[in-house]
Image (spheres, rainbow, N blue to C red):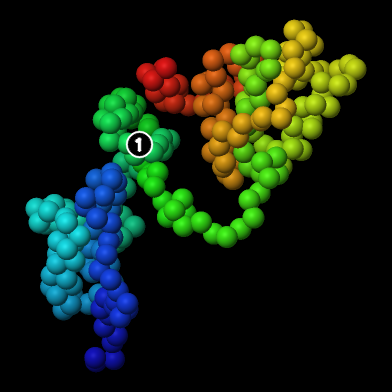
Amino acid sequence: MNGKLEFNLYHKTTFSGRYLSFLSLHPLSQKRGVLMSMVDRAFLLSHPKYHYNNFIFIIKIFLENDYPLKFIFDTINSRLGSLFKHKTLKQTDNSNNDEKITSWFTIPFLPYIYDKFKSIVKKDSNVRLSFFSLNKLDGIIKAQKDVLPHDSKKNVVYKINCKDCNASYVGQTGRKLKTRINEHKKDINKKSGNFSVVSEHKIEFDHDFDWENIKILDNERFFGKRCVSEMLNIKMQDNGINLKSDTEFLHHAYTSILNKFN
């Protein structure tokens, strides 16, 4: 029209109208986020003359997904107020707060511990709390692939238990687990030099480690996150032989939360 393109929301003929149900076991923030993303699309990606019909459509669809009408209206009004104020999708009403955030603490969403974690973390202004769902499709729909042998897995946090006492060691590796375990064994068998804490425990107490039952505590392909997971699992040991320096970079927010639950 007049040499200009007009855009409107488009849905495929296979569009089912299904979104995250309000009755599902997800954090309220995720449900609000789904609705806000639809508001963003309707407001920012379509011509103003289509806005009215698009918002009627959004209200209808989310009512069908069991969202309370008041929740829908409150979320739409709040989001539109933010978009009118900042005028771009990138500048949201949380932009100023995000600049101050130094760390995110992500945990599974479990209703009975949600409030406890939230009350702990909100005391630290430099930490924000986020949640993820435990029940995911990849845990229900299994791809028909060969199972990777336990010791061939990469990017893992692992635990080695002593056979003769309750001592344990936690480590991480981005390589195959068996490669790292072989390094532990070689270190024990060497005749001199700087020994690892695993070797020192073996030499000092003449104890054996359970090499056949190495536990994989976590799988994480990102090195930074894997190191955090390693430090958390080191802290959770009853009688760990790891060096104190192994956890010196763990953010104090994690330590305070672990202390609350130990």
Residue 120, picture quadrant: top left
Q: Is residue 94 above or below residue 213?
A: below
Of the pair 8 and 186, the residue shown nearer to us: 186
Q: Is residue 202 left or right of residue 78?
A: right
Quadrant into which the C terminus falls:
top left
Residue 220, picture quadrant: top right
Identify which residue is drawn at 17% across, 56% down: 66
Where in the figure is residue 146, as x and y percent of width and height? 64, 55
Q: How many marks?
A: 1
Identify which residue is drawn at 40% across, 36% down: 107
**SS label for mark 1:** strand
Q: Residue furthest bottom?
A: 2
Q: Residue furthest left?
A: 70
Identify which residue is drawn at 74% across, 37% down: 178
Where in the figure is residue 136, as x and y percent of width and height? 41, 51
Where in the figure is residue 10, as x and y percent of width and height? 29, 78
The kind of residue tagged 1 is Leu
Quadrant into which the N terminus falls:
bottom left
Q: Is residue 5 above or below residue 180?
A: below
Mark 1 crowd level (few <14, some 14–19, many ≥20, 10 Å Cα): some
Q: Is residue 217 left or right of residue 134?
A: right
Q: Is residue 6 above or below residue 128?
A: below
Where in the figure is residue 61, as x and y percent of width and height? 19, 66
Q: Residue furthest right?
A: 191
Can you see residue 223?
Answer: yes
Can you see residue 244?
Answer: no
Residue designated by label 1: 129
Of the pair 62 and 37, the residue shown nearer to us: 62
Identify which residue is drawn at 39% across, 23% down: 257
Q: Is residue 35 above or below residue 158?
A: below
Residue 195, picture quadrant: top right
